[in-house]
Image (cartoon, helix red, strand yellow):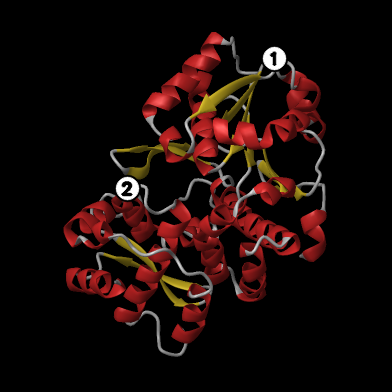
Amino acid sequence: MRPSFYAKNFIRRDASALVCGRGLKSLPRLVPDLFRRADKIVLVTDSRCRDLFGGRFRRMLGRTRGAARVFLAPPGARAKNFRVLEELLSFMLKNGCSRDSVVVAAGGGSITDLAGLAAALYMRGVPWISVPTTLLGQIDAGIGGKTAVDIGGVKNIAGAFYQPAVTVCESLFLDALPARELRAAAGELIKYALIAPGRLGSAIAAALPGALKGKKEDLDLAAVRCAAFKLSLAAKDERDENGLREVLNFGHTAGHAFEALAAGKLSHGEAVLWGLRYEAALALKMGVLGRKHAPAVERILLMSEPPPLPAACLAFARFRALIAADKKNRAGAPRFLLISAPGRFKAADGPPEAALKRVLRELR
């Protein structure tokens, strides 16, 4: 696995492709056929990314940089709503975009979610390229073709499966990230260390401490291992229909509820860290996670310490309402993917209310 993280050629998975590396070619050189047909290029990003990566974006666009139209979305989760989505679609229409136009999403997970959904909707589908610039985006959010916006505080409730023509994970973007943004990815990194099978999970866990300290080699290794694993699952279960992708939701049922209840006091990754702890504790409480494997799970969970859980996250009635509204539920019952050992899981529909409430109370 180690040599591939510097490789500058595609890891192909069915209809989509992934390229990871450091100092990659410009997009028109990576996907020349796509840019040869393109009549318009729309770069979707936010002001923070533009200020941080403006020069790199120009090099990334190569010969098309002068003709590209730039749409600036609000930073963070404020980009993921119908108002901003409509603004982006209107921007594309006013700029004369056609079915041959290309949308380039360059930013964190909110940007790739927003731009990917706009690409799916505009003229019933135009090609798009995912260029995640955060560690969280490069290991999870920017990969796999899930695009969405939020409604009423419920995460990703309106969206579509729409694969990018290519996902480009440029390691140089990670070098500029502050420590908090690296920590924000800890939840997803730990998730992959727990869900990936055998040696792959162990390799991700081994790279995790260095990655969180910003060590380039560990960052790159962790990013490409997680990205390739997610894409392999997405390729086998592109529309999340046969259950193979469900393992990627570990920690997210509770994590999304914590993120909404925290009202900005927890980043997505920090909320997922708490979600992983909650769902592992629920697995232990329900006897799915046995005492034999619990220490190994706990060791990985404790590799990163999240900030304190805000008091609002411990209000059971609101927590219960949010997990009941989660898009993964079946027949209105909360659905959790419970860990039985690293790399092994069991789905649980409608866990007992008493167990849900007790684990939340003990999480304090």
Q: Residue at x 43, y 26 (%)?
A: 84
Give the left or right position of residue 30, taking residue 90 as reference.
right
Q: Quadrant of residue 288?
A: bottom left
- Label 2 crowd (10 A; few <14 / some 14-19 / many >=20): few
Residue 135 in the image: state x and y as whole percent.
61, 52
Screen quadrant of the C terminus:
bottom left
Is 57 placed above or below 5 here? above
x then y, percent, for residue 324: 25, 54
Q: Is residue 161 visible?
A: no
Please determine whether, in this image, residue 44 is positioned above or below residue 87: below
Circle 1 crowding by C-alpha within 10 Å: few under 14, some 14–19, many from 20: some
Q: CA distance from mark 2 to mark 1?
A: 41 Å
Q: Secondary structure at mark 1?
A: loop
For image coordinates 69% across by 60% down, the residue present is 219
For disc 2, the marked residue is: 263
Circle 2 — which element?
Answer: loop
**357 and 292: which is toward the camera:** 357
Instruction: Check the picture and name the quadrant holding the N terminus.
Output: bottom right
Q: Which residue is mark 1?
A: 39
The answer to whether residue 60 is above or below residue 173 is: above
Q: Of tags 2 and 1, which is closer to the observer?
A: 2
**What residue is at 47 percent from the left and 86 percent from the top?**
295
In this rendered view, identify the residue nearer to me: 253 or 298. 298
The total of numbered circles placed on residues is 2
- Residue 194 in sight in this render: yes
Q: 97 or 108: which is nearer to us?
A: 108
Identify residue type, mark 1: Asp
Q: Earlier in the sequence, mark 2 or mark 1?
A: 1
Residue 327, given in percent of the width and then of the height, sits at: 34, 48
